[in-house]
């Protein structure tokens, strides 16, 4: 395509996701510069592979408050597979810059540490869903009727529960979740996605008598317009799997979280939410209705929950400052545009390794 459209001269660089490292070979063969879109947690875990002999609950040196059990590598198959992925990406990846879907003030120290390591321009242009608005990015059909239900609820009274598009639980766990929510006495909006319970269909998911007990206090949908839900004044908490998109969406709306991570970077994010940013409560152990009832009440009715909401509200204000004109993310996005425009395909481009 580039050969056929030489006069248009449209392609000036290739931007690719950090795990799609093989795209670098394409950029190199076309003599194009490349920019990586990355999540720092995944990159850091590759650096830390030599420490894998430590105990799961040991703190990772230099990465407080992370434990070794929180690192994404624990969910990426065998050690041989992890090492091969890391080595392939290290030896083939060459880049002229890195894009981060984050906010500088949120992860400043980590970004500084990585900047010293990689020594290429960094562009923190998050949260992307605020910087580049879209009508919908959902892969599933959203049930917008839940907004009408939320409209009838008191301010900050509703707990929103969604474990994302990939995480699954078993029948026992969904039953414990259901009765914990019922026993908490709090209103809730619960996303029970088809396929989210292993070996079950959605019609069979919830325990007998559950819907009769909650009546109008709970609203259950297959999928929800999450950004709109989190922005609704009735929502006072979010029980989440702690995927990065969900985390950013919650932070942007000032909603504190109950954290139930499953895999990949979710454990890392949950630790930061609870121990660094302090806007989350952990659900670390086996799901049990009594513990669920307690953590829901802590978030939704206790003074502890009010303090979490206050901190989450403060973070929301900082995000708004970053995304408005002259803010950090706003300026970083403009800098990225200028950086891309500076590339000249016809000139000699010197490739510089960053790993």
Image (spheres, grey):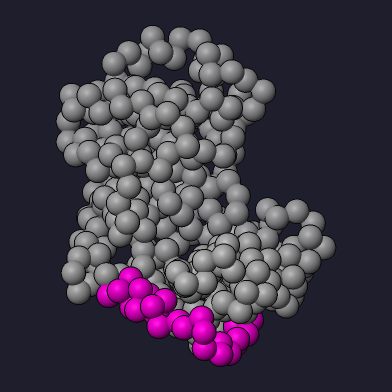
* Foreground of the two, 337 or 68: 337
x and y, in percent, of residue 3 in the image? 59, 69
- What is the number of callouts on the image? 0
Q: Is residue 140 above or below residue 78?
A: above
What residue sits 24% from the left and 23% below the top?
Answer: 149
x and y, in percent, of residue 145 in the image? 29, 23
What residue sits 68% from the left and 60% below the top?
Answer: 73
- Decide whether residue 351 is among the magenta residues: yes
What residue sits 70% from the left and 75% below the top?
Answer: 92
What residue sits 54% from the left and 78% below the top?
Answer: 33
Span of residues in magenta: 331-355
In the image, taking residue 245 as reference, residue 149 lies left or right, namely left
Query: Is there any visible trace of residue 266 in the rendered image?
Result: yes
Q: Is residue 232 above or below residue 147?
A: below
- Assign the N terminus to one quadrant of the image: bottom right
- Decide whether residue 299 is among the magenta residues: no
Q: Is residue 307 above or below residue 218?
A: below
Quarter of the figure with residue 2:
bottom right
x and y, in percent, of residue 26 in the image? 65, 69
Query: Is there any visible trace of residue 48 in the rendered image?
Result: no
* Foreground of the two, 131 or 7: 7
x and y, in percent, of residue 355 in the image? 64, 81
In the image, taking residue 219 as reference, residue 52 lies left or right, namely right
* Foreground of the two, 106 or 343: 343
């Amino acid at each position: 395509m580039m050969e056929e459209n030489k006069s248009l001269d449209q392609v000036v660089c290739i931007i690719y996701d950090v795990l799609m490292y093989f795209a670098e070979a394409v950029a190199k063969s076309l003599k194009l510069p490349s920019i990586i879109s990355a999540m720092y947690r995944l990159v850091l875990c590759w650096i830390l592979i030599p420490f894998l002999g430590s105990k799961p609950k040991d703190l990772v040196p230099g990465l407080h408050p992370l434990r070794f059990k929180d690192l994404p590598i624990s969910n990426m198959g065998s050690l041989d597979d992890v090492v091969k992925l890391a080595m392939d990406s290290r030896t083939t990846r060459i880049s002229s810059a890195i894009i981060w879907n984050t906010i500088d003030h949120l992860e400043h120290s980590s970004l500084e540490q990585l900047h010293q390591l990689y020594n290429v321009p960094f562009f923190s242009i998050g949260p992307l869903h605020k910087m580049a608005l879209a009508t919908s990015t959902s892969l599933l059909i959203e049930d917008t009727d839940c907004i009408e239900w939320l409209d009838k609820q008191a301010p900050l009274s509703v707990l929103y529960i969604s474990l994302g598009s990939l995480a699954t639980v078993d029948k026992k766990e969904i039953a414990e979740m259901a009765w914990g929510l019922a026993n908490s006495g709090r209103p809730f909006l619960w996303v029970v996605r088809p396929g989210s319970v292993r070996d079950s269909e959605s019609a069979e998911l919830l325990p007998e008598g559950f819907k009769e007990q909650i009546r109008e206090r709970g609203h259950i949908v297959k999928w929800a317009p999450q950004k709109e839900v989190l922005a609704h004044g009735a929502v006072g908490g979010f029980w989440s799997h702690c995927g990065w998109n969900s985390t950013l969406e919650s932070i942007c709306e000032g909603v504190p979280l109950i954290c139930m991570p499953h895999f990949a970077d979710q454990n890392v994010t949950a630790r930061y939410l609870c121990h660094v940013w302090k806007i989350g409560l952990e659900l670390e152990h086996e799901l049990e209705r009594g513990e669920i009832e307690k953590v829901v009440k802590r978030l939704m009715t206790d003074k502890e929950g009010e303090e979490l909401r206050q901190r989450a509200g403060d973070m929301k204000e900082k995000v708004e400052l970053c995304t408005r004109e002259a803010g950090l993310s706003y300026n970083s996005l403009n800098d990225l545009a200028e950086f891309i425009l500076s590339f000249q395909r016809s000139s000699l481009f010197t490739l510089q390794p960053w790993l």
